[in-house]
């Protein structure tokens, strides 16, 4: 199950979080240059600044669903 979705508003990158260690590390599916399962850091996502100081955003309307429904 995927529980959270983060996205980059200035490009096509999307992170789907399936597990969280409670501190910083998510395990999930990342859609970017290559789509893959793996770990990603919440602190690292929070540190990214895009054009006009845009941030990586959490999709507040995302509802938990199976990974197969996200792809």
Image (spheres, grey):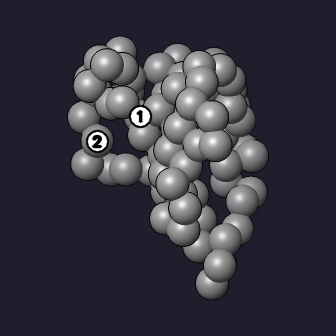
Q: Position of residue 56 (x, y in %)?
A: 57, 58
Q: Is residue 22 visible?
A: no
Secondary structure beneath dot 2 equals loop
For residue 67, above or below residue 62:
above
Residue 18's place in the image compared with 41, above or below, is above
Label 1, on which residue?
4
State how far apart marks 1 and 2 are (Cα): 7 Å
Residue at 54% across / 23% down in the picture?
28
Q: Please tell me which residue is depicted at 70% across the width and 68% down the height of the picture.
A: 49
Question: Residue tagged by mark 2?
Answer: 62
- Element assignment for label 1: strand
Packing grade of label 1 (10 A; few <14, some 14-19, many >=20) is many
Q: Residue furthest front?
A: 34
- 13 sits left or right of 71 in the view: right
Q: Nearer the viewer, residue 35 or 20?
A: 35
Q: Residue at x 54, y 68 (%)?
A: 10
Q: Is residue 59 above or below residue 28?
A: below
Can you tell which mark lies on residue 52? none
Image quadrant for the C terminus? top left
Query: Which residue is at a point 25% across and 48% down the rendered structure image?
Result: 61
Residue 32 locus on image (x, y percent): 59, 43
Q: Residues within 10 Å of mark 2 (few under 14, many from 20)?
A: few
Image check: 18 left or right of 62?
right
Q: Position of residue 50 (x, y in %)?
A: 67, 71
């Amino acid at each position: 199950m995927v529980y959270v979705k983060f996205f980059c508003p200035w490009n096509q990158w999307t992170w789907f979080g399936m597990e969280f260690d409670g501190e910083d590390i998510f395990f999930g599916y990342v859609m970017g240059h290559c789509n893959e399962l793996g770990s990603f850091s919440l602190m690292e996502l929070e540190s990214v600044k895009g054009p006009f100081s845009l941030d990586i955003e959490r999709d507040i309307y995302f509802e938990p669903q199976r990974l197969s429904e996200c792809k």
